[in-house]
Image (cartoon, helix red, strand yellow):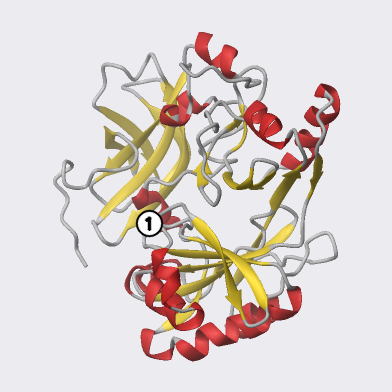
Amino acid sequence: MLHELLTSNRTRATPFTSRVEACGVQAYTVYNHMLLPAVFRGLEEDYWHLCEAVQLWDVSCQRQVEITGQDSQKLVQLMTPRDISQTDVGQCLYAPLCDENGYMINDPILIKHSQNHWWLSIADTDVLLWAKGLATGFGFDVRIHEPDIWPLAVQGPKAEELCVRVFGEEISNIGFFRGKWMKYGAASFFIARSGWSKQGGFEIYLNEFSLGEKLWDDFFEKGKDLDVGPGCPNLIERIESGLLSFGADATYETTPFECGLEQYVSLEADIESLSINALRKQKPKTRLVGLVVNEKIELADRSVLDEKDVIGEITANTWSPRYSVYLVYARCDANRILALTELNLKSTKGLVKARITDIPFNFVTLGLSNQS
């Protein structure tokens, strides 16, 4: 059954909404109280276009929690168990935010503009409220708010060529997970080499609502021969690439260790972090694993079984047209899975075997060939 999404001021439009509508968006979801396009041509067609050409993504819902003031870095460090002390100005850091028990609150990209000026480019939870509570409780001298910033992602193998045409050759000098302020007419935008795909690209942090339509049109005009088109975060591409989605693969009930994010926890660092002591003591109860089924299936439910018992739950799944396998993320009992190489999934035709592997998937090790 199809359902209509009724929008209001609580589900805010963006500077690009009119252009997204004109491009024929088929569905939206709500993310950080904003509209996020979900499908244009179709899931698989959007996937191939992303992997072969270049897309514009309206990801204005990727809100910024801006923290300024003399205790800014102290507050950001308190929120994450990742050591941020060596972060350069203009650097972007992927960092889990965790509470006093080590459980995750969000997994944003931290952007350092100065020691006293940070952006937390957040996933879908109300980090702003948590940050304000911590600042009040710890008596930090900071100002916390959500600035008028609307990110536009340019993703795909032709993204750099398109961005050079719009912003000039200097954009090619931006390193991975680095950003800089660049001119666009009389305006200046922060632009980072980042994005929620592994196809390459940039995120433009638009700070002037009135320039949204002009910027969108400029990309389309200068990218005609590059087959530029509209797009959005793609389920197939993100699972193939091993990217996590907060609220699905990671939740308030999981620690970074239970999501495969241990490399972003600085257990040995001397840092003032709200969660670090709890994380030093905790033993993971669950483990997020990848599962591979060598046929296209229709799931009957989201349960994961060993020989007889349910020991886990599917958090994300898709058919991979590139590798002709069914890919699954599953959260499983950490102890029950230790000695296993296979698990069972419930399909509409009965139980099917699935190989256990790590995330991200290593398709070479799995012996899977690229079908493109």
* Near-viewer residue (30 or 173): 173
* Near-viewer residue (182 or 100): 182
Write down the quadrant of residue 181 in the picture.
Answer: bottom right
For image coordinates 43% across by 90% down, the residue present is 224
* Near-viewer residue (8 or 183): 183
* Near-viewer residue (47 or 176): 176
In the picture, measured across the screen, residue 334 lies left or right of residue 121, that is left
Residue 347: image location, x then y, percent:
38, 43
Look at the picture and state if 80 lies above or below 367.
above
Mark 1 Cα shell of 10 Å, populated few (<14), some (14-19), many (≥20):
some
Look at the picture and state if 360 lies above or below 265.
below
Write down the quadrant of residue 17 in the picture.
Answer: bottom right
Q: Is residue 260 visible?
A: no
The disc labelled 1 sits on which kind of residue? Lys
Quadrant (top left/top right/bottom left/bottom right) for the N terminus: bottom right
Look at the picture and state if 335 lies above or below 350.
above
Residue 287: image location, x then y, percent:
42, 25
Q: Looking at this rendering, what residue extends furthest in the top direction?
A: 281
SS class, disc 1: loop
Q: Is residue 30 visible?
A: yes
Residue 35: image location, x then y, percent:
69, 64
Quadrant (top left/top right/bottom left/bottom right) for the C terminus: bottom left
For image coordinates 78% across by 66% down, the residue present is 6
Per the image, the residue denoted by label 1 is 198
Look at the picture and state if 320 lies above or below 153.
above
Residue 168: image location, x then y, percent:
46, 79
